[in-house]
Amino acid sequence: MSSGAWIFGYGSLVFRPCFRYREARWAILRGFARRFYQGSTDHRGVPGKPGRVATLVAEPLVWVGGRAYLVDAEDWEKTLVQLDIREQGGYLRLISDVELTHGAKETVPALVYIATADNPNWLGPAEPEVIAAQVRDARGPSGANEEYVRRLHAALEDARLVDDHIDSLVRALDAPDEAQARRYLTSGR
């Protein structure tokens, strides 16, 4: 690892990397889909009221877009310590090939953090409206859960990377929830 190694981010690392890197490129990881199935009680929620954050689930015929960061060898260990703390809520490390885009196309091995269904913070699948309600109400030390979803959505849109799951969550967040609708209807407007 004399020159460095790649890290692939598909959640908050897309818009808020917490480490030094030499290069950042948009990239895709084949065989996975981004889903908001992981609970967060340490960043975007609290115990008893978890937020929902992104993880990857295996889906052989799809791909997920994100950011790949080239980290210099001298920064690698420090970066891993930072990321292990950041991703401590149920994420595991794996190495997978990612395809760098938006420039010279190449495939590189990259470190990826993935939360699996067997961790204690796993919330699992739910309808977009259910996930949106949880996201709308959750807040943790890193801020509002809704901000996380919207910032990730905006970053992916800026890169012209389509993600139907996030699109459906943002549509659900933009729709008034039942409590908001009731307040509106009873306010006489």
Image (cartoon, rainbow, N blue to C red):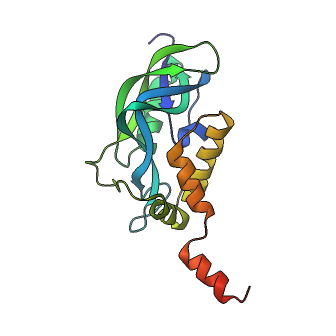
In which image quadrant can residue 112 be found? top left
Q: Quadrant of the N terminus?
A: top left
Q: Is residue 142 visible?
A: no
Q: Nearer the viewer, residue 67 or 178?
A: 178
Q: Where does residue 168 sit, x and y in percent of width and height? A: 54, 52
In this rendering, position of residue 43 left or right of residue 94:
right
Give the camera-side residue of 184 and 86.
Answer: 184
Q: Give the image quarter of residue 144.
A: bottom right
Left or right, 16 with respect to 46, comes to right
Task: Name the side, left or right, on which 79 lies relative to 92.
Answer: right
Q: Nearer the viewer, residue 117 or 22?
A: 117
Total count of labels: 0
Extreme front residue here? Answer: 61
Q: Residue reaching furthest left?
A: 118
User: Looking at the image, which residue sits at the far right?
Assistant: 189
> Can the viewer see residue 127?
yes
Identity of the residue drawn at 31% across and 44% down:
116
Question: Quadrant of residue 159 in the image?
Answer: top right
Q: Quadrant of the C terminus?
A: bottom right
Q: Residue furthest top?
A: 2
- Relative to 116, say whether 61 is above or below: above
* In the image, residue 148 above or below residue 46: above
Q: Position of residue 150 (x, y in %)?
A: 62, 51
As displayed, is residue 129 above or below residue 53?
below
Q: Position of residue 60 (x, y in %)?
A: 35, 31
Of residue 146 and residue 46, the one placed in the foreground of this image is 146
Q: Which residue is found at the position 51% from the left and 24% from the top? A: 75
